[in-house]
């Protein structure tokens, strides 16, 4: 894309363990355009969240980014100093974490936690009145009612949905170019989930903020995102425009995720769970990590390193049997 804002090139993030070196993210390449809505989908443990934490250089030791590049507006953030990275974090790239109750500090009022980002990045030039006015504006924008009264409330006084809105307000405080939303609707009921997703869509429309939605829910990503990247065992196995991935899935894992989604209109259709288990990330096979769970797998699938194959413009899949499978079934 000519308007690429963020680009990951062959990113690999590892964690040493007693069982060996865990490749949580393995050779991931991904791009994000200005104002784009991108979904990163996969089951728990596939590397989605670690990928986002890698972008912000928030991998805790002994974990480390082993190789690759993370280019933000053409600059490799892996080569920036800690001070330069702190300037980007929150101001240019912000993250909404999946558990608001553990992300918010229970000892400080919510309004003060929103104001902290403004203070750190000197958005209002450390002028308290201006900072507080900005916080009240943000609380109103994200749908927190009576912001003046709730400014001094603590996180435990907010409902789960309001806590998530507070986290979004913190992330938006410095008007970042990119919002990384890591499972932003976890533990919320369906009604509140819809409200949070509607809020993020309005943020994208009004501000032009590029959003990466990290989720295990392919249906949610299909409703919200323009493109979808499907991850499995630390790798992207399929990526393309939403209609390509959902209507013509090429990877057996993507098709498996789709068959797991319950459909109200198809009451007689059985939900088909994906058989087997995710492989040990400390001992991932050289070939396709999904081979042991795939009905189409052949011996070559476990032996050959699987390259990306472009099956349509912008639609890529990592599968040796893609031409034999005939796409969606």
Image: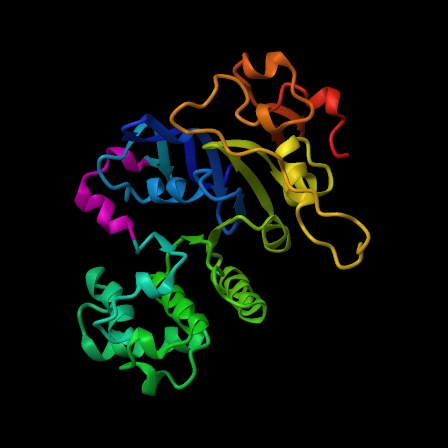
Residues in magenta, as a range: 76-89
Specify how the rendered protein is coloured.
Answer: rainbow
Q: Please say whether residue 1 is visible from this viewpoint.
A: no
Q: Is residue 78 magenta?
A: yes
Left or right of 280: which side holds 260?
A: right
**x, y (%) of residue 125?**
19, 67
**x, y (%) of residue 89?**
29, 51
Q: Can you say which quadrant of the picture contains the C terminus? A: top right
Which of the two residues, 60 or 284, is positioned nearer the viewer here? Answer: 284
Kindly identify the residue that appears in the image at 48 percent across and 63 percent down.
187
**x, y (%) of residue 316?**
61, 29
Kindly identify the residue that appears in the image at 41 percent across and 57 percent down.
98
Which of the two residues, 188 or 77, is positioned nearer the viewer here? Answer: 188
Q: Please say whether residue 57 is visible from this viewpoint.
A: yes
Left or right of 212: which side holds 152?
A: left
Left or right of 308: which side holds 50?
A: left
Image position of 269 with respect to 128: above or below: above
């Amino acid at each position: 894309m000519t308007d690429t804002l963020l680009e990951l090139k062959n990113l690999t993030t590892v964690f040493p363990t007693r069982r060996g070196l865990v490749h949580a993210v393995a050779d991931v390449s991904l791009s994000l355009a200005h104002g784009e809505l991108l979904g990163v989908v996969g089951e728990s443990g596939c590397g989605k969240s670690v990928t986002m934490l890698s972008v912000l250089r928030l991998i805790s030791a002994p974990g480390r980014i082993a190789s690759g590049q993370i280019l933000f507006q053409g600059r490799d953030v892996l080569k920036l100093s800690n001070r330069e990275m702190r300037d980007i974090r929150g101001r240019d790239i912000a993250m909404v974490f999946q558990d608001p109750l553990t992300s918010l500090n229970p000892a400080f009022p919510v309004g003060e936690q929103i104001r902290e980002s403004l203070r750190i990045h000197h958005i209002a030039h450390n002028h308290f009145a201006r900072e507080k006015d900005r916080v009240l504006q943000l609380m109103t924008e994200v749908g927190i009612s009576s912001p003046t009264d709730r400014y001094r409330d603590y996180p435990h006084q907010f409902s789960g949905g309001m806590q998530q809105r507070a986290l979004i307000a913190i992330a938006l405080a410095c008007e970042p170019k990119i919002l990384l939303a890591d499972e932003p609707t976890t533990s919320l009921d369906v009604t509140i989930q819809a409200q949070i997703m509607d809020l993020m869509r309005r943020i994208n429309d009004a501000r032009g903020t590029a959003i990466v939605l990290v989720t295990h829910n392919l249906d949610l990503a299909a409703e919200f995102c323009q493109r979808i990247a499907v991850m499995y065992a630390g790798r992207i196995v399929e990526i393309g425009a939403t209609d390509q991935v959902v209507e013509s899935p090429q990877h057996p894992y993507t098709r498996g995720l789709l068959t797991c989604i319950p459909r109200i209109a198809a009451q007689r259709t059985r939900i088909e769970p994906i058989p087997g288990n995710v492989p040990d990330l400390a001992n991932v096979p050289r070939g396709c990590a999904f081979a042991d769970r795939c009905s189409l797998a052949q011996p070559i699938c476990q032996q050959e390193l699987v390259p990306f194959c472009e099956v349509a413009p912008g639609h890529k899949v990592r599968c040796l049997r893609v031409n034999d499978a005939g796409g969606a079934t």
